[in-house]
Amino acid sequence: MAEPRFHYPWYKKEDTDAFFALFQNNVANFVIITITMLGMGFPQDIVFGQVIPGAAIAVLVGNFYYAYSANRLAHREQRTDVTALSYGISTPVMFVFLFGVLLPAKTLTGDPELAWKIAVGACFLSGLLEVLVSVIGRWVQRNLPRAAMLGAVAGVALTFIAGEMMFKTLEMPVVGLFVLAVIIIGIVGRVVLPFRMPASLFAIVFGTLLAYLLGESDSGKIAEGLSHFGFYPVLPSMAAFDGMSYLFGSMIGILTVVLPITLYNAIETMNNVEAMEAAGDKYDVRECQAVDGVGTMIGALFGGLFPTTVYIATVGAKWMRAGRGYSILNGLVYLLAAMFGLIAVISALIPVAVVAPILVFVGMSMVSTAFQTNAKKYYPAVALAMLPYFANYVMTRFNNAAGEVVSRISDGIVPLGQGAMFTAMMLGAITVCVIDGAFKRAMAFALCSAGFSFVGLMHAPKLAFYAAPDYVMGYLVMALLFAWYAFRGVVKRDDHYLGED
């Protein structure tokens, strides 16, 4: 008698709950992107006609692939309880691209369309790098200290996200502080809100209503929002290749942000896939990193400018006993919402001051994560890695006049802000190595810093040979000092390093 044919369902009722859980996260990202870009002065035809549809294409491609991957795993192991990986725009990386790539590009060029092309080019390169990193991802994870990487990201989060959005929050004090209170109560304090609504949804709904009731937001925006209903075709674009010509020219400094945040994204995927394996579904980490990179590149070819990743929410979907249907539905819904202007409608109706407090929390949670995921002994490394972005923030805000404006404060502000992400990671990594007594590794990172300074990736306005000579010498002196300790030998006693007698 023939065995019954194995069937892995396309959709089951548990997929519905998992879809809405993932939908809330992704729609929040789309709305944040829209409101932030419009607030930066980007025209609607770029935001609604290029960026949002491009992002939706990336989400569609990745979700469809992971649904296929789940089906492949289910048939291989003859299990119907396999859950597809959750996929979408990486929230921390999204903020870094908004405030560390897109905003500096617009500030430096003064041209929104050119800034968009540069950011799309950076996104395409980020996807390509993640495909390459998939080959060496585990080596990177082993050798680049987490405190250094997350400390650098925390610097962006504190200055460009939490700090900047706190300013926006107080532009409408009554509305902004109300929403901030809701976020503190519902997310930080974990107190149940009326109607048992999720805190972010409650904040957006009632914060928006309050803004209109108080006259803080023009009621004419309702009609404006409804006017965004329409058809936004998803069309390929050459913007990525136009932008890359600038990334390897006058805008090359932006690459110092793209590389480390791509490594962060690849490791985020790795950690989330490994968490899924612990929950019972084993996927190939390297394949997932490559898929994330390809999805990112495809999105960029349609005008999107945000890297994608496997979400940590995947484990939640597994707990809900979801299959592959929620992943397929998620990709389809976002494509349709982008094509018919639904994201544009929502974004037009919601004031920036309503969303800003949510972003304050996001920024602070990223800072908190940098500390919580590291041992206490590495806190100084995290803190030191955050500092270069304070200088970078000042540079960005004062545009090309930064040198003249801040010189009365310190001549070190501008060079500290140039190549901030690399500087942050190198200083953080050096500190971690010294804390661990690994002075040979500290010496290696100091030599890397000297090399980066030599070619202009750190402390210099552009790439050039011997671009920052004083800093090259400074890091070489550091390397010599670490070499002395490495070959002299140290012992660890009561968490302090003391020279041997």
Image (cartoon, rainbow, N blue to C red):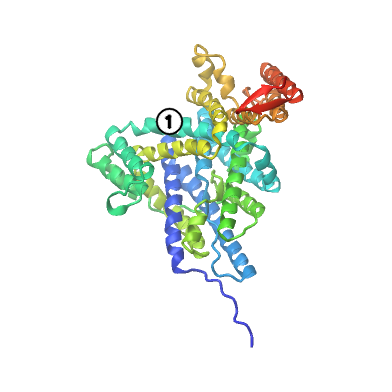
Image location (x, y in percent) of residue 394? 49, 23
State which quadrant residue 165 falls in: top left
Image location (x, y in percent) of residue 121? 60, 40
Residue at the limit of the structure toward the right, as seen here: 487
Left or right: 463 in relation to 177: right
Q: Residues within 10 Å of mark 1 (few under 14, many from 20)?
A: some
- Asked whether 145 or 88 is in front, the reply is 145
Residue at the limit of the structure toward the bottom, as seen here: 1
Q: Is residue 288 visible?
A: yes
Left or right: 18 in relation to 286: left
With respect to residue 264, does 485 lie above or below? Answer: above
Q: What amino acid is at disc 1?
A: Gly
Residue at the limit of the structure toward the top, as seen here: 408
Left or right: 479 in relation to 251: right
Q: Is residue 224 visible?
A: no
* Residue occupying image coordinates x 37% and y 38%: 357
State which quadrant residue 123 falls in: top right
Image location (x, y in percent) of residue 189? 35, 42
Image location (x, y in percent) of residue 213? 22, 42
* Residue occupying image coordinates x 31% and y 49%: 192
- For label 1, the residue is 163
Left or right: 223 in relation to 232: left
Label 1 secondary element: helix
